[in-house]
Amino acid sequence: MSSRTLIRGGLVITAADETHADILIEDGRIAALAATGTPAAEALTADRVIDATGKYVIPGGVDAHTHMELPFGGTFASDTFETGTRAAAWGGTTTIVDFAVQSVGQSLRAGLDAWHAKAEGNCAIDYGFHMIVSDVNQETLKEMDLLVEEGVTSFKQFMAYPGVFYSDDGQILRAMQRSAENGGLIMMHAENGIAIDVLVEQALARGETDPRYHGEVRKALLEAEATHRAIRLAQVAGAPLYVVHVSAMEAVAELARARDEGLPVFAETCPQYLFLSTDNLAEPDFEGAKYVCSTPLRPKEHQAKLWQGLRTNDLQVVSTDHCPFCFTGQKELGRGDFSKIPNGLPGVENRMDLLHQAVLDGHISRRRWIEIACATPARMFGLYPKKGTIAPGADADVVIYDPHAEQVLSAETHHMNVDYSAYEGKRITGRVETVLSRGVPVITEREYTGHAGHGVYIPRSTCQYLG
């Protein structure tokens, strides 16, 4: 049985256009668009009609950086693939790309298989995987080629976390050389972890143990230095580079310089760096632990440079780096020693709404909102035009968005499996009303109508900004 859904009367916003159009959805895909009120639109028929008058109709968000069930710091991220993807749907995100982890001494394949097992049958929305490469050797380099062929086309490396995920410059160079050959994209956590560990040790020896010192030891200059080094290693390897969770204006300057030189260098920032600051890390009574993530929150003056980078396209994507840990029992592992606070913030549910607020605040345009949250991440990671846009043939991942509804962000009302909100009490305008994933209603007029197992794994092509 073919099922047809018609969305009538909304303002359809993509990265390229804003048009009042009716959208016909058939068999999980966009079948047709027609300008509202025209004979072509009047001729469209369906068994289910959604009235979107006065609303925006936007592509489902693509969050290219999440960590569901990630083991870290002696505990696990508190969102499972089931709870995390359900929360994503509530926030208007219909595709996530999560990170499978290679453990040192294990194969890439073993790590990828483990993540497939966690996700399969549990996701409310569609998902893909990047691969964290923790152990570069001849075998893992060969495996990178095989993974690219089967749709895992991006590999994350860490210049931070010595003894856990860390790669030295030689390992990074080898992986970049391999990606230059196989079409993969290296994603880099750019912080000088070796130097940071020295500063951590010295701070703790001075008795500086509160959460705010997490931000003070992870210096902006050490993010900028690592960003510069990653760019030059990629240049030597002839490889493209994607820098994750950029937080410091000095790092943005390095990225802008590289792009001005014509290098294939890309980067994302995250809502926490755009809306939060070291003021949050300094909150009393250990409350600052809620805001411990890496790269860390920066002083407020960095925010303007991040917004500027998003406007000038020196930063192309906003992802969440969603990696939640409960305050009670998880963040508290670091009482008396900030270095033991699990690094990560919840945010997969808030990204689309916060960026809409940024439109209202004058930071970005409506089309740029869709570009940085939907279209560019889809292109960057080989999912476009199946994901990230509203066009004939695309998956019917569609959000009906009420731009006038007001809401207050709070742990009491969010759907992420975590006991606090990083944006507790923040008033914003704009809210998701209905979400379709491949034409199936997952959120229907502010009610969850989806189910675990609807979301399917999506193999990805290579980065669509290259050659």
Image (cartoon, helix red, strand yellow):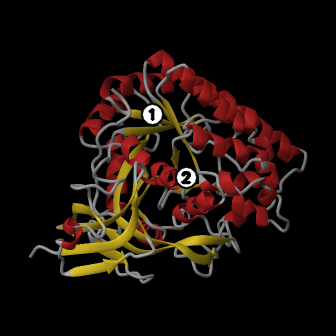
| In the image, residue 125 above or below residue 425 | above
Which mark is drawn over residue 365? 2
Q: Which residue is mark 1?
A: 186
Question: Callout 2 environment at 10 Å: few (<14), some (14 to 19), or many (20+)?
Answer: some
From the top left corner, tell me how far across and down residue 314 is, in percent.
57, 35
Q: Is residue 44 left or right of residue 171?
A: left
| In the image, residue 126 above or below residue 129 | below
Look at label 2 and name its amino acid.
Ser
Disc 1 on helix, strand or loop? strand
Q: CA distance from mark 1 to mark 2?
A: 29 Å
From the top left corner, tell me how far across and down residue 73 is, in percent.
61, 55
Q: Residue at x 40, y 45 (%)?
A: 130
Quarter of the image where one finds residue 381: top left
Question: Which of 115 and 422 lies nearest the eye of the viewer?
Answer: 422
| In the image, residue 245 above or below residue 230 | below
Disc 2 on helix, strand or loop? loop
Quick one: which residue is furthest to the left in this view? 1
Q: Residue at x 62, y 38 (%)?
A: 160
Q: Is residue 278 left or right of residue 19?
A: right
Q: Is residue 203 left or right of residue 189?
A: right
Tell me which numbered mark, 1 or 2, is placed earlier along the sequence.
1
Question: Which of 347 and 113 lies nearest the eye of the viewer?
Answer: 347
- Split into 4 quadrants, where in the image is the C terminus? top left
